[in-house]
Amino acid sequence: MSNNETQSNGNLPELQWHITGETKDINGFSCTKATTTFTSAGVPMLISAWFTNEVTIKDGPFDFSGLPGFIFELTADGHFNATFENFNYDKIKVTPIKDI
């Protein structure tokens, strides 16, 4: 596997995101907040994600995706918090990812 590939064992969850319109800067990117509910081990959690459409990769940490841009920060009811730091993105060297 090269550094440009992503793999997942199994299906990614289909999440119903609600884009709030709230914004903040993360690593120099303008990010928008979105929320969804996700159940893990029978425990429902409110997920908050901060994403930017300035990065055209529609992905994020763990199995969370489905927003119109890259997820820089993800929190779940105080259970965990994941934030990308020192993120480098070169718009000129972008490799398109094809939807299957």
Image: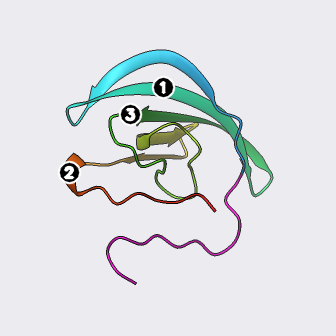
Q: Nearer the viewer, residue 53 or 30?
A: 53
Tell whether 39 sits left or right of 91.
right
Against 62, residue 71 (above or below) is above
**Circle 3: element type:** strand
Residue stretch in magenta: 1-13
Residue lying at the far right of the rendered structure: 42
What is the number of the mark on residue 72?
none
Against 96, residue 53 (above or below) is above
Q: Nearer the viewer, residue 97 or 50?
A: 97
Mark 1–mark 3 Cα distance, whole angstroms, equals 9 Å
Find residue 13 and report its horizontal and vertical position in percent: 70, 54
User: Which comes sooner in the sequence, label 1 or label 2?
Assistant: 1
Q: Nearer the viewer, mark 1 or mark 3?
A: 3
Image marks 1 and 3: residues in contact by CB distance under 8 Å: no
Please give the name of the residue rendered at 72% of the width and 48% of the height, measured from the top-left corner. 14
Q: Which residue is mark 3?
A: 52
Q: Which residue is mark 2?
A: 92
The type of residue carrying mark 3 is Thr
What is the number of the mark on residue 33?
1
- Is residue 90 highlighted in magenta? no
